[in-house]
């Protein structure tokens, strides 16, 4: 008796295997490599894994002009997947660099002699979560969608908690685990309802079944879609599913926050766009409105809540909620232009999000306490490069023409307008106006207050130890790369848009 | 070097200078000198641009176009018309003087400061040369970034509030303009200012106008103005009122009036009324203002009103006069703010009740302030007189009472300028004016005298600008034909 096995396109899964392989090697490091060289060894493996991932996914992009599913319809081998993987691996590489110097976090850091205890596990988890996300963006049916979601989520839960010297870290991990499980449960329940309504889990199959059986208004299907949107909303931290975000971003070690705030959004938004346009094209009206409302809520809550924050990581967390709102405007348009806008927006966004958290990490190391607006005073003058980079990121986030954030917003608004939603453009514009206050607040704190005002404790003890700050070469490289990407994307719009167009053409719009 | 590359050079040369200054670890003196070099080179390139500009030809000149993102019809498209040449000239000359002032007073954190001044130059020149709506918007916004930091870092004690007001006001306007740009451009299928058709949408017109009236500013959108002009370093106030405010007025001419002919005539009376109110109200506030910079700041509000009056009169003389007055007032208020800075450096205050009697023993200061003041109050034969006369003649053709309001306001101008001059130069010696307070030093003279020289030259030959701004005998026809 011969066992029938499905044909596997190994090359189509190349990026994922590269990342998993590197993850295994990093895990072996934790056991086999002596502590003295463990950090260097595991970071090198991680860097190699992500570099291989970038190369393979670029190659995959070139070789996948005709998008199709592989492994019995479980996974999409197309340019949407490939481009998403390139972005994810790029962020992963930058995280590797920052992690080398900043994991575990420096704020309230305890025993310095034990810093290298879990560094290899950190890299193993980083690579594993990246592999999960790389699989997630290409998921082709509800089963692989859920599995890969859990795959990268579990890795992220542990990454949040890995800094167990910090009480905030454990709390963050636990909070993320509980809320994340709730989101996953909603997604799973939604998937079950959709399966119940259509009798299939494949994205294409769902669309076909819904069309042939006239299921567009089927209650199970509609409730299923709503639950799936809620589940994905948790992952992309869109309001009203955002409540975990500020706490987890604040509590987790800053390198992990940088990774989560950029990569998780890339994965969740790209998947959401693919899932909606592929599986539920006939319910476009429904999920279009749903995402438009979620986007409006995210813009409102993210921006207004950020106004009253003093902790910089919390400000950036709320800013990431509001940017989820901007990108969801593109998703809600559901058009080819929306796909392009989303793909384009993610590039400068993830660079800016990653870069700004990395800079916060550098300041944390200097002070040894969480970074607030007060103790950011004078930072811009003391660390000119990081200050200028932060300046660019904040203005870029606010949509001023110092980076690709400006063009991204413009594209998103264009997509909304083409969809006939001028009101959504107005909402976006007003949200941008509100956001200026806190983005400029960070610039103000860095440059417009002298460092003599720096007060780390209410008593007035300044905790900055004398002498030059640590060299942090790798962090500078990572921030420099993020800066180059965010500014470069303002000038190289056309090439990026061409890439995004080819990627979006793989989707059935 | 081809003539058309001059437009791009004028935009990107100062930006390159800014990047160079940020990268090179030079001393304060060397940084300032390098910035001056770039500013003067910029003036040189502008002179070359004027020399090569063909005033006998219609349409866009020295055009450069490159693809930026094609799928939405956005391109990097720059070029100049007659009137934009003069505004670019105003920008580079005023910015050179202001950069020189920063060099002269030795601003601290010099690399940041001079880099931002150069960045501001590039962005402002970009506004006057951009021929694509999104590019225009990008430069329009880019002006705000250096301004924000220049005021916030080098400004006075209440600088933080001033920057917050400035940013919130101007961004509220320009973000509405962004929404209008998205709608207008996508409807037209192109964002190109030369190719795009006119529109009859009143909403879009208002979206653009709100950004321009805040930037200019006109009453009642001037809430940011007094704080910003008082708290900014004097040379930045000079740039703000002399140059940046003109970007708002330029936008009215290049976009609002040109692209929206029907809404322009629909809202003409409303805009004229706002402009007249800015003129009268600004003049009254300037007359009541307690400090040197307050007088100049509110007079800028009044002058913006006057220029808007000329633009929205929609008559030949009004357009000619508005362009002339933009340049003349730009030079006047730059000079006045620089002189205000010089006075404040000597007396530590700009409050008029603490000043006075500075003319005695300070002939250069007295002569310059007197000359600029007299030109600014539009004494017959001055550049400002020519500009105001043309504007009033233009608006008179619309209806006589607009001209009557304008003429009344010119009397007010004389009143507040003379009050300012006598409060600073004459009367009893103020309590803060020490005997040792020096006259203007050669360095300061080198900055203000050229500006005054240009003003005197314009007074001698105002037609140099007013007859060389719009091609053909009728500016109205040129505007209606979208400058083609």
Image (tube, coloured by chain):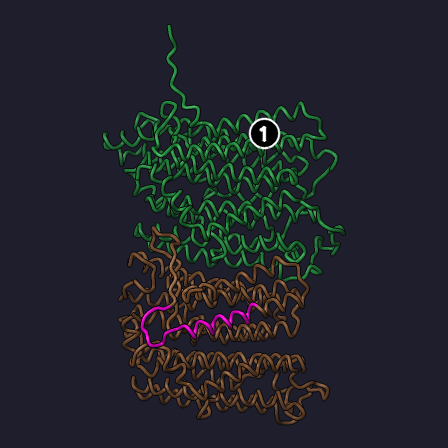
Chain colours: A green, B brown
Label 1 Cα neighbours within 10 Å, binned few <14 / some 14-19 / many ≥20? many
Give how far across and how far down residue B439 sits, in percent: 66, 86
Q: Quick one: A20 or A228, which is closer to the camera?
A: A20
- Left or right: where B66 falls relative to A150: left
* Along the line of sight, the residue nearer the viewer: B194 or A461: B194
> Does residue A294 show up?
no
Residue A258, picture quadrant = top right
**Residue B387 lies within the magenta run:** no
Q: Nearer the viewer, residue A304 or B143?
A: B143
The magenta stretch is: B38-61
Horizontal arrangement in the rendering, residue B141 relative to residue B447 (left or right):
left
Name the side, left or right, on which A446 lies relative to B413.
right
Name the dominant secondary structure of the magenta segment. helix
| Residue at 48 percent of width and 58 percent of height | A400
**Location of mark 1 (residue):** A124
SS at badge 1:
helix
Residue found 48% across the figure and 39% down from its top: A87
Identified at 51% across, 90% down, the residue is B374
| Residue closest to the far front | B1
The answer to which of B287 and B82 lies nearer the viewer is: B82
């Amino acid at each position: 008796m011969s066992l029938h096995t499905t044909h596997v396109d190994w090359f189509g899964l190349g990026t994922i295997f590269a990342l998993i392989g590197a993850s295994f090697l990093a895990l072996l490091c934790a056991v086999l490599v002596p502590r003295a060289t463990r950090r260097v060894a595991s970071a090198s493996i991680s860097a190699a894994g992500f570099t291989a991932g970038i190369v393979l996914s670029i190659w995959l992009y070139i070789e996948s002009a005709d998008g199709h599913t592989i492994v019995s319809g479980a996974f999409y081998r197309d340019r949407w997947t490939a481009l998403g993987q390139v972005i994810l691996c790029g962020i992963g590489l930058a995280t590797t660099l920052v992690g080398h110097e900043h994991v575990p976090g420096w704020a309230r850091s305890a025993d310095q002699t034990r810093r290298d205890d879990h560094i290899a596990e950190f890299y193993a988890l980083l690579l594993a979560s990246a592999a999960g996300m790389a699989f997630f963006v290409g998921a082709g049916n509800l089963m692989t969608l859920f599995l890969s979601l859990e795959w990268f989520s579990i890795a992220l839960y542990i990454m949040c908690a890995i800094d167990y010297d910090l009480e905030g870290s454990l709390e963050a991990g636990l909070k993320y685990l509980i809320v994340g499980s709730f989101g996953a449960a909603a997604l799973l329940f939604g998937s079950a309802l959709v399966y119940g309504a259509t009798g299939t889990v494949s994205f294409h199959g769902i669309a076909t079944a819904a069309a042939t059986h006239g299921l567009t208004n089927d209650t199970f299907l509609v409730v299923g879609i709503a639950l799936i949107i809620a589940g994905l909303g948790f992952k992309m931290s869109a309001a009203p599913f955002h409540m975990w975000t500020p706490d987890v971003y604040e509590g987790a070690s800053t390198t992990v926050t940088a990774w989560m705030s950029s990569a998780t959004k890339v994965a969740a938004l790209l998947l959401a766009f693919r899932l909606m346009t592929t599986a539920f094209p006939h319910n476009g009206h429904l999920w279009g409105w749903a995402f438009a409302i979620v986007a409006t809520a995210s813009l409102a809550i993210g921006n207004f809540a950020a106004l009253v924050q003093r902790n910089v990581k919390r400000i950036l967390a709320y800013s990431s909620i509001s940017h989820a709102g901007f990108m969801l405007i593109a998703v809600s348009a559901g058009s080819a232009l929306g796909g392009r806008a989303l793909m384009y927006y993610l590039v400068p966004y993830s660079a800016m999000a990653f870069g700004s958290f990395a800079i916060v990490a550098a300041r944390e190391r200097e002070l040894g306490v969480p970074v607030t607006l007060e103790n950011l005073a004078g930072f811009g003058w003391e660390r000119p490069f990081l200050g200028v980079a932060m300046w660019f990121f904040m203005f870029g986030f606010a949509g001023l023409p110092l980076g690709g954030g400006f063009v991204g917003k413009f594209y998103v608004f264009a997509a909304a307008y083409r969809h006939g939603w001028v009101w959504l453009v107005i909402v976006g514009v007003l949200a941008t106006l509100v956001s200026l206050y806190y983005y400029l607040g960070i610039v103000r704190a860095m440059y417009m207050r002298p460092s003599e005002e720096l007060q780390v404790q209410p008593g007035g003890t300044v905790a900055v130890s004398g002498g030059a700050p640590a060299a942090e070469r790798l962090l500078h490289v990572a921030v420099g790369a993020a800066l180059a990407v965010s500014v470069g994307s303002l000038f190289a719009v056309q090439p990026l848009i061409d890439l995004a167009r080819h990627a979006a053409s793989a989707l059935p719009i | 070097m081809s003539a058309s590359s001059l437009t791009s050079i004028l935009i990107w040369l100062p930006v390159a200078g800014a990047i160079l200054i940020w990268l090179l670890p030079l001393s304060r003196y060397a940084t300032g000198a390098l910035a001056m070099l770039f500013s003067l080179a910029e003036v040189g390139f502008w002179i070359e641009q004027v020399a090569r500009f063909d005033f006998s030809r219609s349409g866009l000149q020295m055009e450069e176009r490159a693809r930026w993102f094609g799928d939405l019809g956005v391109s990097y498209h720059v070029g100049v018309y007659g009137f934009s040449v003069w505004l670019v000239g105003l920008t580079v000359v005023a910015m050179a003087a202001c950069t020189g002032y920063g060099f002269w007073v030795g601003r601290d954190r010099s690399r940041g400061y001079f880099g931002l001044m150069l960045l501001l130059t590039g962005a402002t020149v970009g506004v006057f040369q951009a021929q694509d709506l999104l590019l225009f918007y990008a430069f329009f916004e880019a002006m705000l970034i250096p301004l924000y930091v220049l005021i916030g870092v080098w400004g006075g004690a209440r600088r933080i509030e001033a920057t917050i007001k400035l940013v919130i006001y101007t961004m509220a306007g320009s973000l509405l303009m962004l929404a209008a740009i998205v709608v207008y451009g996508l409807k037209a299928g192109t964002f190109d200012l030369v190719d795009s058709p006119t529109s009859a949408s009143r909403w879009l017109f208002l979206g653009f106008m709100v950004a321009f009236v805040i930037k200019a500013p006109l009453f009642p959108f001037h809430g940011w103005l007094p704080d910003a002009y008082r708290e900014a370093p004097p040379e930045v106030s000079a740039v703000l009122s002399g140059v940046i405010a003109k970007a708002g007025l330029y936008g009215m001419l290049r976009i609002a009036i040109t692209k929206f002919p029907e809404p322009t005539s629909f809202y003409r009376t409303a805009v004229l009324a706002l402009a007249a109110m800015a003129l009268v109200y600004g003049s009254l506030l300037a007359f009541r203002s307690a400090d040197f910079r307050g007088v100049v700041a509110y007079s800028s509000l009044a002058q913006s009103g006057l220029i808007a009056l000329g633009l929205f009169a929609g008559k030949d003389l009004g357009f000619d006069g508005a362009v002339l007055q933009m340049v003349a007032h730009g030079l006047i208020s730059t000079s006045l703010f620089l002189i205000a800075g010089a006075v404040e450096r000597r007396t530590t205050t700009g409050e008029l009740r603490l000043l006075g009697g500075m003319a005695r023993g300070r002939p250069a200061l007295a002569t310059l302030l007197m000359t600029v003041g007299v030109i600014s109050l539009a004494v017959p034969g001055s550049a400002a007189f020519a500009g105001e006369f043309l504007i009033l003649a233009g608006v008179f053709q619309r209806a006589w009472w607009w001209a009557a309001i304008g003429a009344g306001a010119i009397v007010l101008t004389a009143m507040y300028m003379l009050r300012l001059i006598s409060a600073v130069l004459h009367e009893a010696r103020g309590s803060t004016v020490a005997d040792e307070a020096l006259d203007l030093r050669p360095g300061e003279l080198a900055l203000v005298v050229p500006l005054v020289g240009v003003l005197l030259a314009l007074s001698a030959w105002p037609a140099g600008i007013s007859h060389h701004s719009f091609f053909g005998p009728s500016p109205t026809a040129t505007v209606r034909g979208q400058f083609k």
